[in-house]
Image (tube, grey):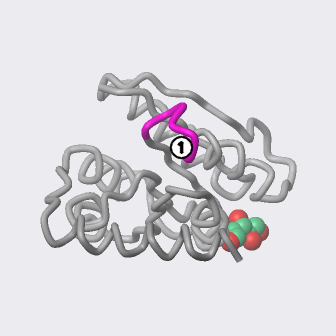
Amino acid sequence: MERIAIASDHAGRELKEDLKEFLKVLGAEVMDMGVNNDTAVDYPDYGSPLAEKVSNGEVPKGILVCGTGIGMSILANKFKGVRAALVNDVYTARMAKEHNDANILVIGGRIAGKGLAREMTRAWLEAKFEGGRHQRRLDKITEIEKRNNKK
Ligand code: RB5
């Protein structure tokens, strides 16, 4: 399995640690990008370095965890080429890959239990992007991204 980066703020740290172990069991090479203690931090400080690595192709995919997952998903989607999907159920996690080719999975550490978070992660990792009409839609998003970056 390919390399996968993972990061969280303090509110997502416990879940991040559990997912890290799960990813290793699945055979992934995990890059832990913090946070590594329970002191309150600002999620952009931990989400940005990961989103940057996905954006520039250094790692193919990543997982971000904060309290609700909302802050990390807003942040990650500011980075060029990042498609971050906040998921709260297994169906959405699978669709995030099949239809949206999400390269960052975002989970709320105060929302999802460890069992659900593991299953959502597995569903996203095992799913395959369907391409076709979904690629056409992603191409439209890429065009919008390019247009907006010129402004
Ligand atoms: C931290 O309290 C919390 O606001 C943060 O983890 C996240 O949920 C933000 O969206």
Amino acid at the residue labelled 1? Val
Q: Which residues are magenta?
A: 54-60
Task: Kindly state the secondary structure of the residue where label 1 is placed.
Answer: helix
Q: Quadrant of the C terminus?
A: bottom right
Find residue 7 and report its horizontal and vertical position in percent: 63, 44
**Camera-side residue: 63 or 78?**
78
- Residue 37: which quarter of the image? top right
Q: Is residue 60 left or right of residue 90?
A: right
Mark 1 Cα-neighbour bin, 10 Å: few <14, some 14–19, many ≥20 = many
- Which residue is tagged 1? 54
**Camera-side residue: 79 or 13?**
79
Q: Is residue 69 magenta?
A: no
Residue at figure coordinates x 46%, y 41% from the top left: 19
Where 15 sits versus 83, above or below?
Answer: above
Q: Is residue 22 left or right of residue 56?
A: left
Where 96 sits versus 141, above or below?
Answer: above
Q: Is residue 107 left or right of residue 132?
A: right
Quadrant assignment for ligand 1: bottom right
- Residue 101: which quarter of the image? bottom left
Residue at figure coordinates x 32%, y 22% from the top left: 27
Q: Quadrant of the N terminus?
A: top left
**Camera-side residue: 65 or 144?**
144
Find residue 128 and report its horizontal and vertical position in percent: 17, 50
Find residue 57 and report its horizontal and vertical position in percent: 51, 37
Residue at figure coordinates x 54%, y 70% from the top left: 145
Where 135 sits versus 57, above or below?
Answer: below
Q: Is mark 1 within 8 Å of ligand 1?
A: no
Find residue 126 and report its horizontal and vertical position in percent: 20, 44
Q: Is residue 57 magenta?
A: yes
Residue at figure coordinates x 49%, y 76% from the top left: 144
